[in-house]
Amino acid sequence: MIANRFVDQQGIYLLSHSVGLPLKSSLAGAYNAFWQPWLGADEQIWNHWLEQIERFRDQLGLLLNSDSCNFCPQTTISSAVNKIIFSLSARSDKNIILMSEEDFPSVAYALQQACRLDYQVRYIPAGLDLNDMSIWDEYLTDDVALVLITQVQSNNGVQLPVDAITEIAAHRSIRSIVDIAQAIGILPIDIQTGSADFIVGSCVKWLSGGPGAAFLWVSPDIIEQCHPQNVGWFSHEDPFEFDIHNFRYAKDALRFWGGTPSVYPFCVASSSLEFVNSFGVAVLREHNVQLCQQIIDNLDQDELMSPVIADQRSGTLIVHFGKKHQQITNSLRGEGIQFDSRSKGIRLSPHIYNTEDQISTLVQHIENSR
Ligand SMILES: Cc1ncc(COP(=O)(O)O)c(C=O)c1O
């Protein structure tokens, strides 16, 4: 059974929007991929480690349906975003970077650095319905150079119509970055159906791949126009050429890489990616939708802050119990339910390792503490 492949939980673990539980096999997998070549103490160490990076790129390619050469490992999503903005040529007719006030602050902080390049940041105010395409139509104005689209917003559990938004952006010559941090591993994603220029994500959440294995995808249509400033020998077309006077960008997305890369996080994440690819994200999503529905069916109508329609919702439910919020959430914590809180309410993210019985226990505790 898929669920048995994960480590045992303490209480009822509903924090997969933050850190997915590891596979039992991740430790041994990382030992084989990372430690064994190192302990082998021969000249092949880097060859083995670089094979692991290729494995990571291949698995991302399978999961998201794109050639592996379009992916570049990154340490964090915000660092990837920073590399993207400093890689693009400025345009005299466009200097606005558009994002939503509901986007993740870390990514916003990185984009705000673009002010050094004379960009200005414009925010779509929080509270607007970003599933309403007329909002995007209104905000994607001629002066917008770059738009950030967060596929799943972590504060409200809303899933955005990314393909439709990137299509409008592409028509208006606006570069797009899609942040899939909260979507990858729980929502099926097919890069080929969208028109994004860049996609950024990581493996720490629903993919159970641990921290540090972030990545950047760049469209092959624009790779030649990208000139990252933050480079190192692994951004070179031939890292082992060692000609100090002859830097040439790697032909593919690896031009966004940098100096001597980290390896360990990508060994951990590759095991998880292989595991998920062996059956597909749709299986995880179906189970998630079923357990979310079980929770929704037991809430009062006004307690659900995230969308009630599954297609507009991510894997996370945001719940607020009104006047009894503190009382109920304190009680749930006391019962070993593991969740976190944001301004709009608590976040509950049922994964494949959560069961119907666990959700029945959760809703029973909610009922008892009302
Ligand atoms: C939507 C979204 N983007 C990005 C991140 C993380 O970004 P970084 O890798 O820069 O920490 C998170 C983390 O929770 C997130 O929810």
Image (tube, rainbow, N blue to C red):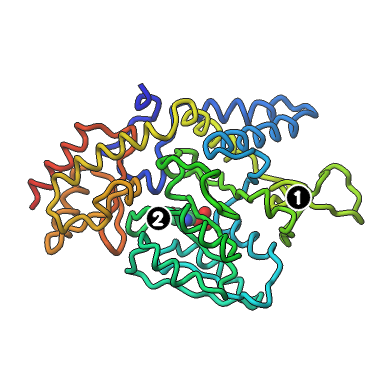
Q: Is residue 165 left or right of residue 291?
A: right
The residue under the point 59% across, 34% down is: 267
- The x and y percentages for residue 104 are 44, 61
Tell me which residue sits at (45%, 73%) in the image: 123
Q: Amino acid at mark 1?
A: Ser
The answer to whether residue 241 is left or right of residue 136 is right
Residue at the spot 71% in from the left edge and 29% down from the top edge: 48
Q: Residues within 10 Å of mark 1 (few under 14, many from 20)?
A: many
Q: Vertical placement of 322 versus 53: above or below?
A: below
Across and down, in percent, residue 10 comes to 29, 36
- Which mark, by number, is residue 103? none
Circle nearer the N terminus (2, 1): 2
Place of residue 96 in the rendered image (x, y in percent of width and height, measured from the top left): 56, 74
> Could you classify mark 2 by the number of other residues whose Cα lies within 10 Å: few (under 14), some (14-19), or many (20 or more)?
many
Residue 20 x, y percent position in the rendering: 41, 40
Numbered circle sitting on residue 235? 1
Mark 2, secondary structure of its residue: loop
**Nearest-to-viewer mark from 2 and 1:** 2
Q: What's the CA distance linking mark 2 and mark 1?
A: 33 Å
Tell me the amino acid under the disc marked 2: Leu
Tell me if the residue at label 2 has its CB under 8 Å from ligand 1.
no
Front residue of 200/355: it is 200
- Residue extending farthest top: 1
The kind of secondary structure element at disc 1 is helix
Vertical side of 61 occupied by 252: above or below: below
Q: Quadrant of the N terminus?
A: top left
Would you identify the image quadrant in which residue 56 lies?
top right
Res. 281 image quadrant: top left
Q: Which residue is mark 2?
A: 160
